[in-house]
Amino acid sequence: MPRRRFLASAATALVGGRLVNRALGAPLLPMAELNAGAPLIVSTWPFGKPANEKALSVLEAGGTGLDAIEQGIHVTESDLSNPSVGLGGIPNADGIVQLDSCIMSGPGHRAGSVAAVSGFRHPISIARAVMEKTIHVMLVGEGAEKFAAAHGFERGPKVTDGQRAAWKRWKAAKAKEAAAAADSKKRPAKNHDTIAMVMLGRGGDIFGGCSTSGWGYKVPGRVGDSPIIGGGLYVDNEVGAAGATGIGENVMRYCGSFLVVELMRQGLHPQEACIETIRRIAKLDPKGFDLSINFIALDKRGRFGAAGTGTGFEYSVTCGAFSKVVQSPGLTSADIGPLGGNRK
């Protein structure tokens, strides 16, 4: 069966794995519908939809692609009810929210990134300033905060009152447990919902951004894939762009977003590239498909797609014709044969 036809049905067996169609309230689009043209904005999770719509409005008002990515992600960073992006995020083990973010411009292949930043509302803007105002790509911790202060970026609390109260409850519960070390390895629910956003502009240029508060109650200083170029985000203006969400450690060890783009370079549709990337990671990783990783992607032709482990995940797509939340395929199988073929 031709590759595109078997991918059109999520109930069909995938070579070396299985596509799962367990809708979470959003449609799973057939391959024929995964083509929107430009402008096109794709982001992770349902909360990406208002961010996409803001980005599109910026483009329609004459803003640049970078303006659109930055202001779109501002929408999610400003939502203090979101426990995984911005200053409303779950703090680290010391009770402080540390934010990570990056931004990429296809033209000029430029990038900026910040990690472990506390007390500033919009790390995506700081990342853009690193790209545009320094010779560096990445600033972290105290250095990034000094840079942000010197450039007058908007400050905010190092943790919200609600998250501080939750952190105190977490600390109290942790102290009561005999196996405190084992407890510290547990991953709280809904703490990995990074916003990654990729965009194809009308002129054919590609941009992307990513922002997160990271793993809830993480070890202070922990940095995941989100601000790592090639890990949580990668943009190639000749090919396309990809972004990731999930457990960052399981993405960054494999340069996941970079791999998605490279597979698109080889001719794969964005959705195929996301699926094949997960298969490749699962083949190499001792956990197989038990990884909690998800990818979004778009290419230069205006095609898009996504895939995740397990039941997949919901992602948001916005273009001139529509704006909606879509369900990705999910992959789950013990048979993780070699990339592009069956296991012998």
Image (spheres, rainbow, N blue to C red):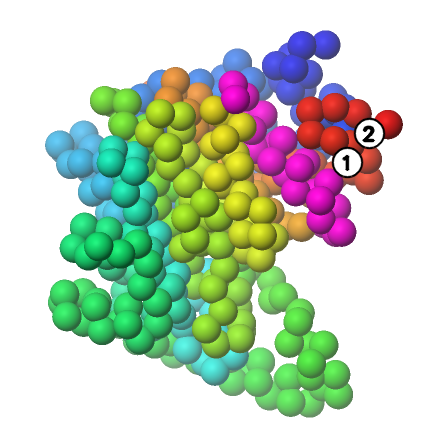
Q: Is residue 272 magenta?
A: yes
Alpha carbon separation for disc pair 1 and 2: 7 Å
Amino acid type assigned to the residue bearing label 1 in the image: Ile
Q: Quadrant of residue 123?
A: bottom left
Q: Earlier in the sequence, mark 1 or mark 2?
A: 1
Q: Residue at x 72, y 86 (%)?
A: 177
**Overall secondary structure of the magenta section:** helix
**Label 2 element class:** loop
Residue nearest the viewer, comparing 66 with 91: 66
**Label 2, residues with CA under 10 Å away: few <14, some 14-19, many ≥20:** few
Q: Is residue 219 left or right of residue 292?
A: left
**Label 1 element class:** loop
Which residue has dot 1 on it? 336
Inspect this view and state whether residue 344 appears: yes
Q: Is residue 184 magenta?
A: no
Question: Where residue 161 sits: x, y (%)?
Answer: 38, 78
Q: Residue at x 15, y 36 (%)?
A: 63
Amino acid type assigned to the residue bearing label 2 in the image: Arg
Residue nearest the viewer, comparing 232 with 173: 232
Could you say which disc has been placed on residue 322 in the image?
Answer: none
Question: Where residue 170 sits: x, y (%)?
Answer: 58, 80
Q: Is residue 322 left or right of residue 23?
A: left
Question: Where residue 227 sits: x, y (%)?
Answer: 40, 55
Q: Give the residues in magenta.
A: 266-290
Which residue has dot 2 on it? 343
